[in-house]
Image (spheres, rainbow, N blue to C red):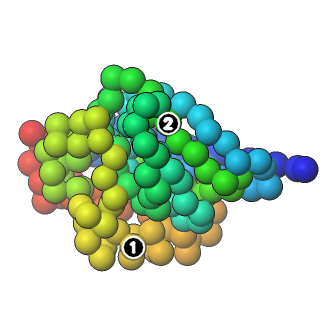
Amino acid sequence: MRTDISFASLPPRSGLAPYVTALYGASTAGGPPQRQLELPVAGTALILTLEHGWRIATDEHAPLRSHTSFAGGLTLTPAVSEHDGAYEVVEAMLTPSGTAAVLGVPGGWLAGDVVALDALLGAEAGLLAERVAGLPGWTARLRGLGRPACAAAQSAPVA
């Protein structure tokens, strides 16, 4: 069985430092189902699932919940994720100011939790995932993910 894996990163555009610290993309296909620990994050991980879903919990003792696109807040311990052997995601690491500007909630509100993105953004969450998935290649997708942060940065004061 051959597993295809792809990773990408892109620094945020200038001017986004108060809102976004990093942009990442990852995909894997053809592999076995996996369960893994996810490193704690010092901010909010906004994850758009472009293909296939995830199951995730905020710690290894909590029940796993299925998610497509979601936001995970500040944690002090590793989260646990599972997938069925394939996924494709893009991720923006948001600062507390970025969490407030992009998701409309204070950064601390998501601490220790994983929340479905449509619960935060409504129908815009699905539209954003569709737009980003339709872009060709990692660079375009990561820039596409950064666009909502750019728009929010233009209208929100830095907290």
Of residue 136 and residue 48, the one placed in the foreground of this image is 48
Residue, disc 1: 126
Residue beneath the point at 30% across and 76% down: 123
Residue, disc 2: 80
Image spot of residue 49 (x, y percent): 51, 60
Residue beneath the point at 53% across and 42% down: 81
Circle 1 SS class: helix
**In the image, residue 36 above or below residue 8:** above
- What is the three-letter code of the residue carrying label 2? Val
**For this view, does 132 lie left or right of residue 7?**
left
**For this view, does 2 lie left or right of residue 94?**
right
Few, some or many residues within 10 Å of mark 2 (<14, 14–19, 20+): many
Question: What is the quadrant of residue 124 in the picture?
Answer: bottom left
**In the image, residue 54 above or below residue 15:** below
Q: In which quarter of the image is the C terminus?
A: top left
Few, some or many residues within 10 Å of mark 1 (<14, 14–19, 20+): some
- Give the mark nearer the N terminus: 2 vs 1: 2
Of residue 69 and residue 64, the one placed in the foreground of this image is 64
In this view, which residue lies farthest toward the right? 1
**In the image, residue 59 above or below residue 103:** above
Question: What is the quadrant of residue 34 in the picture?
Answer: top right
Q: How far apart are marks 2 and 1 (CA)?
A: 24 Å
